[in-house]
Image (cartoon, rainbow, N blue to C red):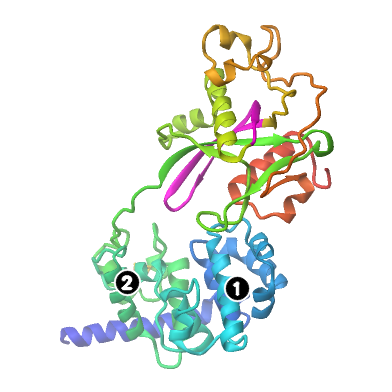
Amino acid sequence: MNLSSTVDTAASYFSRELLAWYRMSKRTLPWRQNREAYRVWVSEIMLQQTRVDTVIPYYERFMNRFPTLQALAEAPEPDVLKHWEGLGYYSRARNLQAGAREVMERYGGQVPDDKAAVSALKGVGPYTSGAIMSIAFNRPEPAVDGNVMRVLSRYYNRDEDIAKPSTRIGMEKLAASLIPEGAAGDFNQALMELGALVCTPRTPGCLTCPVMIHCAGRLAGRETELPIKAKAKPPKPQARLAAIIEGTGEHAGKVLIRQRPDSGLLASLWELPHVQLDEPAVKPRGRAAKLAAAAEPPVERQAEDAAELLQRLQAESGLRVVARRWHAAEEHTFSHLHWMMRVYVAELDTGASRAVWPAGLRQAGALPTEVAQQPAIIAAESAAPYSSAESSAPNATDEPDGYRWIGRNQMRDYAFPNLFGKILYDYWDATGVEEGGV
Ligand code: SF4
């Protein structure tokens, strides 16, 4: 047998066996109930960077609220973001809605059976257009993502770096050549399913794999070594300070949140007021370092943080925020950034209500100038650290543009990134405010 017939055998064997396996053992998933293009589109966008198990409840909730493309196109954006809350990568939700609006305007609400038109929709890249065209319309278009590249790299024992765009293009050609006639949708899903269930990243289940006989990577003993992928630059660590600003008077029991700008990272989502620090940040590595980073900082550091919050939030938003006590340290990793956040419970400074810092700090010269110059916030030596001073002055009631006072019950009306949702729910739990409270 010559080389080309061996390759042909391996290719036709792969397509045939994989398809048969998929039709026998595919999972029942909500987006597989029918192949309507809108449903496929939503599921594929949700599944980017996110595991199937995680997506299922989000998908069901989203489709209940936006059962048709028209419903999604006509919904207010905050409603869409709220139904995406927790899935992360919120630009996906915004782009999905923008794409749905485009389909309403240009194609009368029907996703077009046209590769170029689908590829031109907002947020639809080569993978998603391939998935929509093949699954919804059974067109022989490849849908190549990281899972598929892993399977093909192993099956063909290929050494190309899958992080390179040229490798992806080569893989798309290869995947297209493998699609059996009339079975594009099932075949592409079969490839994805094999990558998700059998040919998994760390421990491929070669012994149960439907295509193991001709798998060149396995035959060469390289199944765990492949695919080759150049290391991406690690996310840049950034130190940040956040304030849970507690309301008083008519806002008692509430906290102040603000909306992010309508473009850029986490656009339009709601968050706690916070500032980025200039201090060099190092992502903690190892258990001991992580525990140390999560621990309550020494009082000197807390005093410095209080001064930063006061100065920076005033400069950036006009709010005078006085930190009252330590709350927690939290972290969140984005694709390019790693936020390390120190969070304080605080209040708005109305000129009368002041946080109390240990007087020993001032004597030791440990308080930063901005804090030390405010006599009202220095307590007597005997005062308990971080307790609130008595105040009979009017409460802070101003709500600057883009800010809201909310109680636990209003959490469901605003879309928060995971990080701030967690901080706030932990805070409500710690203060004893239950669901149905203020
Ligand atoms: S035999 Fe192993 S390495 Fe090859 S495709 Fe199957 S699971 Fe992946």
Q: Nearer the viewer, residue 164 or 345?
A: 345
What segment is highlighted magenta in the picture?
A: 319-345
Residue 29 is labelled as 1
* Beta carbon of the mark 1 residue lies under 8 A of ligand 1: no
Residue 20 is at least partly visible in this image? no
Residue 168 is labelled as 2
On screen, residue 217 versus residue 28, left or right, reads left
Task: Report x, y in % for residue 421.
Answer: 65, 47
Residue drawn 77% across and 50% down?
A: 410
Judge whether residue 341 is colored magenta: yes
Q: Nearer the viewer, residue 81 or 177?
A: 81
Is the magenta region chiefly helix, strand or loop?
Answer: strand
Residue type, numbered disc 1: Leu
Task: Report x, y in % for residue 97.
Answer: 60, 71
Residue 358 is at least partly visible in this image? yes
Residue 200 is labelled as none
Quadrant (top left, top right, bottom left, bottom right) of the N terminus: bottom left
Q: Secondary structure at mark 1?
A: loop
On screen, residue 63 versus residue 163, left or right, reads right
Mark 2 Cα shell of 10 Å, populated few (<14), some (14-19), many (≥20):
some
> Compared with residue 329, is residue 134 higher up or lower down, i.e. above or below?
below
Which numbered disc, 1 or 2, marks the residue closer to the eye?
Answer: 2
